[in-house]
Amino acid sequence: PLRVVAEEAEFLIMSKESKTTLPTPLQQIAEARHHDPFAVLGRHVEAGKSLLRVFLPRAERVALADTEQPLQRIEGSDFFEIDLPKGQTDGPFRLKWADKLGKQHIAHDPYSFPPQLPDFDIHLFNEGKHRHAYRFFGAHPHTADGVEGVLFAVWAPNAARISVVGDFNQWDGRSHPMRSRGGSGVWELFIPDIGNGSLYKFEIRTPQGDITFPTAPPPLSGRRRRVRAPSTPRRRAVYPRRTVAVAAPPRRRAVAAR
């Protein structure tokens, strides 16, 4: 296992050079150490105001895509914030941002969506009574609040933090930390605006600070896997039972010999 991934090491070096001291929860998000990213990211009410906070490590500028209102960078960090005006406090929020190479991106904020896995499914799984857990563990195309994307879920009760890494975030564990569903050991994250064919795997931080990529069989596979649409299950043809009548052999008349 790796103690620190390369991206984390790069951030730590930059942090030492910066004079800005971030609050502990933000520092934990930036170092991919926070157990509950939804407590920091997304929409929150602070000091009586509705605030949207995002963390985009490769962004130069960020704005709300629908209104072009810019988000302000927290100095010395990759956090961006905006005080949401009245009438714009309901998510999901669509972001428009430019990276350090000038490339433009438009995507919804993953941390403005509520939990997606039903509590009942998680309860049945913890009871050992769920017969179809494969339908939500792993990665599955999903629609939330009218937005298409992929729902990721994994069971790792001893993890300190889990992130989805893939070709859509440069395999950076800081970009998409997952939501912990409490004592169930289930972690989930809906990532909008990605689809079939995306490569991904789960990056797990242990309580000791090690970074691991599990190698268990699916759905907890550490290999790079592709998001695929669920196939239609094959069904056996069922034919109605019919009574087959066996015809009696025809009667033949005796023919007298001449």
Image (cartoon, grey):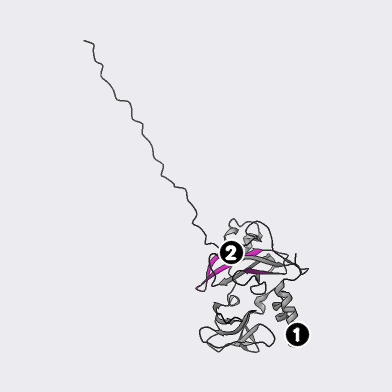
Q: Residue 78's x, y, as percent?
A: 66, 82
Does the magenta-highlighted stretch encompass residue 41? no
Q: Residue 140's x, y, as percent?
A: 56, 64
Indicate which disc residue 92 carries: none
Residue at image mark 1: 17
The residue at the point 59 percent across, 58 percent down is 134
Task: Give the residue type at disc 1.
Answer: Glu
**Callouts 2 and 1 close, C-beta under 8 Å:** no
- Which SS class for mark 2? strand
Residue at image mark 2: 139
Does the magenta-highlighted stretch encompass residue 158? yes
The answer to whether residue 27 is visible is yes
Q: Which residues are magenta?
A: 140-166
For the view shown, which residue lies furthest in the right direction? 208
Decide which of 147, 7 is in the foreground and name it. 7
Q: Main secondary structure of the magenta part?
A: strand
Task: Give the residue type at disc 2.
Answer: Ala
In primary-sequence order, the first of circles 2 and 1 is 1
Decide which of 98, 125 is in the foreground and name it. 98
The residue at the point 70 percent across, 78 percent down is 30
Q: Distance between the Cα atoms at labels 2 and 1? A: 38 Å
Q: Residue 8's x, y, as percent?
A: 72, 75
The residue at the point 62 percent across, 86 percent down is 81
Q: Left or right: where does residue 243 sit relative to residue 200?
A: left
How packed is label 2: few (under 14 Cα within 10 Å), some, or many (20 or more)? many
Q: Residue 105's x, y, as percent?
A: 55, 79
